[in-house]
Image (cartoon, rainbow, N blue to C red):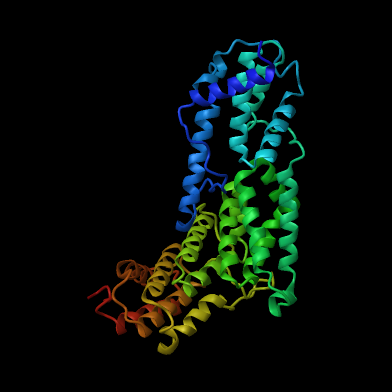
Amino acid sequence: MPSEPEEANKGASAAKRSTKSPVGPVRDTPRETALGHQSPSDFLQEEYSRINSEWISENLAGAEFEVAPRDKRVPTSSGEESHPELPTLAAELIEQVRSQTQLSHNLSRVAVIAVLRCLSRSLPGTCPWDGLLDSVLKAEECERPLVASQDGDRLQLLLRRLWHCKNDDQQRSWPTHQDEASILGLLEELYTILVDADPRVSRLVVQADEYDCVTTLALYYQMEPRASLRVWMLRVFLTLCELDLQVVSLLLHSVLPMELARDLQANSDDIERTKYTALLLTVIFSTGEKPPNNVHDDPARVLTHELSGVPNSVLKFLVELFSDSATAELFYLNDVAVLLDIVARQLSDLPPGDKRRPLYLSLVERVLGSTSYEGHRQTELQRCFQAALSREESAPEEKEVVRRIQDTWPHWFPPADC
């Protein structure tokens, strides 16, 4: 009579022969984010990850382990109701598989499900297999407190170390040692854990202290000039945005959008960096949330008192810039077109008699006089001019600016009686 180890060896051999694919997993590599953004140089790693996932799904969760859908299974008395510890046990099983194998959280869950299905068929009635399996299947829906997580502890440690890197002013201004490789390792590990770990664990860490880690990383990006570190920070930011939508709003109100805009202008020859920069900017502005500063806000206004007769500092600054052709040349044609888009919309929206209307009209006059105007928004602007002249509520200075524009550029903005 064969011993138990011999029987186990025979069973393992038979299982190997019965698998559909003779090839095992290639190797464990960092998985890509749900957004699916990896550089072209990571193509092979992406393929290895895909092969691993397909092999594990095929060999561990194959048809021989399948059971009926959850709603068609015969209910048992050993469910979650009679065993309240099952959800915690299910979470611990997934955590142990991930800790011992370095598989992602999702693949660890697949492995646990496959093993539990096999045990429920082979050893029915010995344990509440169906209840435990149901807890694993519903693990993503469970809002119960999570077990102590190795990923959570590691995330907190990595974020603390990056906080120290951000606050090491001496090392950035006058480096005493080469730390780029070590910081790069921290960012790569942070990115990998955020991709592979249970998203609920990652969210708890990120949300701690009112998302303090997000603010820290945004400030660190502003301070850190090294391109290799900035690229990995961009990957981390994209993964955080996918993980928690609130991160998008926090980044919108941080220094990051301005830094990303500067990067796009200064590093157009770095394709990889430009790709991630443009993608993150798109994500940040994709929700339609109002940015912290817009055309109505005056950044120079520091007092809450209403000051009559004080013009908006941004509008006044633009009027001064376009008053001289030398400073007006600093703007590209596309920039001028966007500016006219904004002005035309504001003139259409602002009510008659609004104190900002004359300044907007003065800006149009300066733009026409200092740039090569080619008729952009001509119809909308002409409609605004005619409305200003026809309304009794329009201020005298507003009508005066419109008449000067019509007299100077009659081929674009002819008077109404022409």
Residue 295, given in percent of the width and then of the height, sits at 52, 68
Q: Compare residues 50 and 245 and report the one nearer the observer.
A: 50
Q: How many marks?
A: 0
Q: Compare residues 75 and 361 and report the one nearer the observer.
A: 75
**Which residue is at a point 31% across and 84% down the rendered structure image?**
408
Q: Compare residues 316 and 270 and report the one nearer the observer.
A: 270
Is residue 195 among what the camera can see? Answer: yes
The answer to whether 202 appears left or right of 21 in the picture is: right
Vertical arrangement, residue 41 with respect to residue 225, above or below? above
Point out the image quarter for the C terminus.
Answer: bottom left
Point out the image quarter for the N terminus.
Answer: top right
Q: In which quarter of the view is residue 300 placed?
A: bottom right
Vertical arrangement, residue 325 with respect to residue 276, above or below? below
Q: Residue furthest left?
A: 418
Q: In which quarter of the view is residue 268 placed?
A: bottom left
Q: In which quarter of the view is residue 314 placed?
A: bottom right
Residue 334, given in percent of the width and then of the height, sits at 38, 72
Vertical arrangement, residue 337 with respect to residue 198, above or below? below
**Which residue is at a point 47% across and 62% down the rendered structure image?**
278
Q: Residue furthest front?
A: 1
Residue 393, given in percent of the width and then of the height, sits at 45, 69
Residue 151, given in percent of the width and then of the height, sits at 70, 45
Vertical arrangement, residue 341 with respect to residue 205, above or below? below
**Which residue is at a point 54% across and 21% down the rendered structure image?**
14
**Which residue is at a point 29% across and 73% down the rendered structure image?**
375
The answer to whether 168 appears left or right of 53 in the picture is: right
Is residue 293 among what the camera can see? Answer: no
